Image (spheres, grey):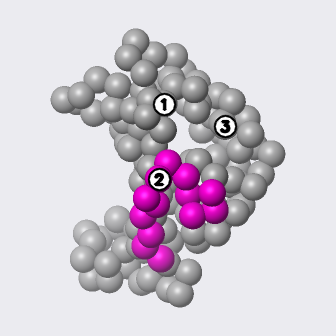
Amino acid sequence: MILEAAPLHVRAGQEPAFEDAFRVAQRIIASMPGYRSHRLERCIERPGEYLLLVEWDTLEAHEQGFRGSTGYQEWKRLLHHFYAPFPTVSHYAAVEGASSPGSGSAMPDAANTSRTTDSPLSAAGKPA
């Protein structure tokens, strides 16, 4: 299992519209092969800042599967115009033995990788 973390900065005044659009878009990501779960969190201290956390079976399920799907085009249409600046997405793998019980996979496998992109684009050259 890998964890995708996307800090999202939404244009000022667009937060309610973004949240409404996300409620629609979440159905797209939830239908993807390799998807496990997601959470969208709103920052308490900084209006317009959100954190999207998505659990995937593998990095490929996100970067090739989701981003290569026709559903991703609709995801982009619904959400990408809200971001300023465009988010940098990172992927994380669990540290064995360093998680609380019930918090996800404690046994990493060969598919679990940790990679941070250095730009708003993923390693595959596509935005989150």
| Quarter-of-image position of residue 108 | bottom left
Q: Is residue 97 left or right of residue 84?
A: left
As displayed, is residue 80 above or below residue 71?
above
Assess whether residue 26 is covered by the magenta stretch: no
Residue at label 2? Answer: 119
Residue drawn at (50%, 86%) of the image: 109
First reached walking from the N terminus: tag 2 or tag 1: 1
Q: CA distance from mark 1 to mark 3?
A: 13 Å
As displayed, is residue 30 above or below residue 76?
below
As displayed, is residue 73 above or below residue 13?
below
Where disc 3 sits, the SS reads helix
Would you say residue 25 is visible in this rendering? yes
Which-is-in-front pick, marks 1 and 3?
1
Residue drawn at (57%, 64%) of the image: 123
Instruction: Give the class, few, some or many, for how many residues have Cα within 10 Å of label 3's Cα (few <14, many ≥20).
Output: many
For the image, the number of numbered tags is 3
Q: Which mark is residue 83?
A: 1
Q: Which residues are magenta?
A: 113-125
Residue 74 image point, x, y percent = 73, 35
Residue drawn at (37%, 79%) of the image: 106
Disc 3 marks a residue whose amino acid type is Trp
Instruction: Give the class, few, some or many, for how many residues have Cα within 10 Å of label 1's Cα (few <14, many ≥20).
Output: some
First reached walking from the N terminus: tag 1 or tag 3: 3
Which-is-in-front pick, marks 2 and 3?
2
Q: Nearer the viewer, residue 62 or 119?
A: 119
